[in-house]
Each structure stands twice: as C-alpha cells, then as structure tokens.
Amino acid sequence: MKKFLFLILSVSLLLAACNKSDVEVMSRYGNTMQEFSVTDQNDEIFTESDMDGKVWLVDFIFTNCATVCPPMTMNMTDVVNQLNDDGVTDFGVLSFSVDPETDSPQVLKEYMSYYEIPEDVEWKFVTGYDYDYIRHLAEKNFKTIVAPPPKGSNQVTHGTAFYLIDQNGKIIKDYSGVDNGNTSFPKEEIIKDVKTLTKSEQ
C-alpha cells in the first residue's frame, strides 16, 4: 500500500512539474508555422527551418508606420533587452514587414538601427514577398489581418499583437504589443513565458 501511495505521489509531482514548465496554448492556436522563405535585413534568406530549436517572438510592422509600429518595436526592444540582461539566449525575434514594396533589406536595417537592440540577439526584420503572400501568411498562421494601404495613403492595416512560438515552430499564444485601453503592455508576462519555454526562468 505504501509503495502504491508513493507511486501516486511521484506521478502527481511529475505531472505538476510538467504543467508548471509549460505555457498554456491559446485555443485558437496550436498550429505549426507553415513553410516560408523571406529575406532579412542583411539580404539573406530566412526560412521556417531556421527557427528550429529556439523560442521566437513574432510581430508585423512597417517602417513608414505613423502610429503603432514605433511603440511596438520599442516594447519588443524592452523585452529583448530584459531577456538578454537575464541571461536568456535560446530565443529570437521575427518582424514581418507588411509593406514589402517599401521595406527593402536596406530600409529595414536602417529602421533597426534606431533601436537599442543587443548585438548578440537574433532579431530578423524580413521582407522579399508581396502583399498577397504576407496577407495569407498572417491569416493562416496568426489569425490576423494585413491589408494594403487605401488609395491615397501609405498606411497598411495590420494587427498589433506579439506572438509566442515554441522550439518546434508551434504558435502558443499572443499578447498586445502596445498599451490597450486600461491594460498596459504585458512585458513581464512575455518575459516569464519566454523564460518558461527556454527553461531559463530565474
């Protein structure tokens, strides 16, 4: 009887440990990133296979954005710097341009230089596709919208979420990339989740 109770207790503790180490998948996600091939700010090809083995944060931005993209990129920079300061290494950031006609690799590299991004953090600003490609990728993978600018405008319609991707390319959850009404940008939640997935939580 004692052996049986010990076994039950051991299994319970094991399950509790597993649950503690995992980040709960939001019900609308759980899918794996589809195949893609894009060009980063260094004019190098980046594909979904290059994401293997790392935790990733993903967002959608463009360099001519007059509203949400600067605070989004600043918030992501704050997250990246905190993770870097805390010694977390097995993560990266992937920022898809939603204005690929304007955002060449050179333009994205200049945009990146405006932010204090640690040199040893892998942050890919990517382009090299058309609007149909990025619209399909955003809708199919992240359940979000990307729409070309209306006539007479250069402002693309796109979502402001950050997305968490695990080491196997599975989309886990999203977060608001900016302050939203009475809700502040969830910096600490994002950092905690990345640390949990990388098994680096302090």
Image (spheres, rainbow, N blue to C red):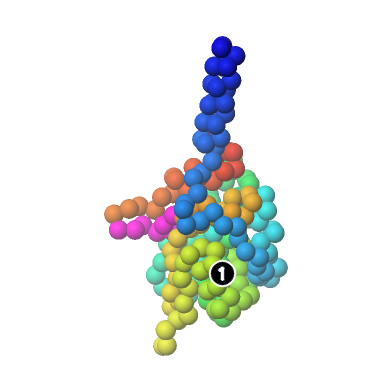
When the figure is inspected, residue 202 is found, relative to residue 146, above or below; the finding is above
- Few, some or many residues within 10 Å of mark 1 (<14, 14–19, 20+): many
Provide the residue designation for mark 1: 137
Q: Residue at x 57, y 43 (%)?
A: 197
**Which residue is found at the position 46% from the left and 71% from the top?**
145
Between residue 131 and residue 81, name the one nearer to us: 131
Outermost residue, bottom direction? Answer: 152
* Residue 178 inside the magenta-drawn segment: yes
- Report the amino acid beneath label 1: Leu
Q: Residue at x 67, y 69 (%)?
A: 37
Residue 191 appears in the picture as rendered: no
User: Picture coordinates of residue 21 (x, y %)?
Assistant: 54, 37
User: Residue 151 placed where, x, y %?
Assistant: 42, 88
- Residue 175 higher or lower than 198, as above or below: below
Most prominent secondary structure in the magenta stretch?
loop
Res. 30 in view: yes
Q: Is residue 10 magenta?
A: no
Residue at 56 percent across and 35 percent down: it is: 18
Total numbered labels placed on residues in the image: 1
Above or below: residue 138 compared with residue 167: below
Q: Bounds of the magenta span?
A: 175-181
* Residue 46 percent across, percent down from the top left: 68, 65
